[in-house]
Amino acid sequence: MAELIKMDFANVEKTNIQYKNSKDGFLDNYTRIIVFIKESGEWESKEYYTNCEGWFDSNPEHILSAQIEELREIGIELHQIQKRGVIFNQIRVGFSIGEIGIYWYQIDESYDGKSNVVLFASVPRKISINVGEIIQAKQ
């Protein structure tokens, strides 16, 4: 999971992980992964968030409508978003290498009282994840 999301989870509490296998078009299977985490301390200065390759924007009005829909599907409203960004990672798919975006959103704790960051990634393959094992792994 850490290699896929491109994050060091050593000092991060994973509060929830959700995934959903879907099909886009005739043959394109993909998996949507959502990771909820609790960052602590001076986390906003971590390279993962400050050196992101995309926007680092606190204005949620610039979020794409598809992303707004995905956030609302899991119960996050625009007023709960404080900052956001995107990090890109490469993943091998068959004989080719594809790029995936890992979208992060800083959310206020009114969402679930435990999480303050949510990460979204779409993997161009159908996969399964042992959520319990990952969450229970040493933080």
Image (cartoon, rainbow, N blue to C red):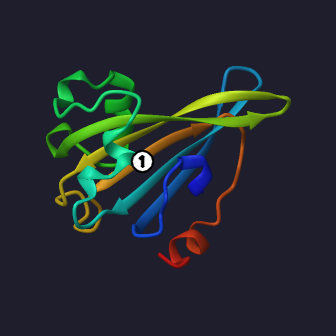
> Which quadrant holds residue 41?
bottom left
**Depth order, front residue of 77/13:** 13
Q: What amino acid does circle 1 point to?
A: Leu
Q: In terms of secondary structure, where does tag 1 sit? A: strand
**Depth order, front residue of 36/77:** 36
**Depth order, front residue of 21/127:** 127
Please tell me whether residue 120 is drawn above or below residue 59 in the rendered image: below
**Depth order, front residue of 128/135:** 135
Residue 17 drawn at (x, y percent): 49, 60
Judged from this view, the residue extending furthest toward the right is: 95
Please tell me whether residue 101 is drawn above or below residue 5 in the rendered image: above
Residue 111 drawn at (x, y percent): 23, 57
Please tell me whether residue 25 is drawn above or below residue 13 in the rendered image: above
Q: Which residue is mark 1?
A: 119
Apparent side of residue 124 relative to residue 18 in the rendered image (left or right): right
Image point 17% across, 46% down: which residue? 80
Residue 46 drawn at (x, y percent): 32, 52
Apparent side of residue 121 relative to residue 90 in the rendered image (left or right): left
> Which quadrant of the figure contains the N terminus?
bottom right
Mark 1: few, some, or many residues within 10 Å (few <14, many ≥20)? Answer: some
Please tell me whether residue 132 is drawn above or below residue 110 in the rendered image: below
Residue 62 drawn at (x, y percent): 23, 22
Image point 19% across, 60% down: which residue? 109
Image point 27% across, 32% down: which residue? 56
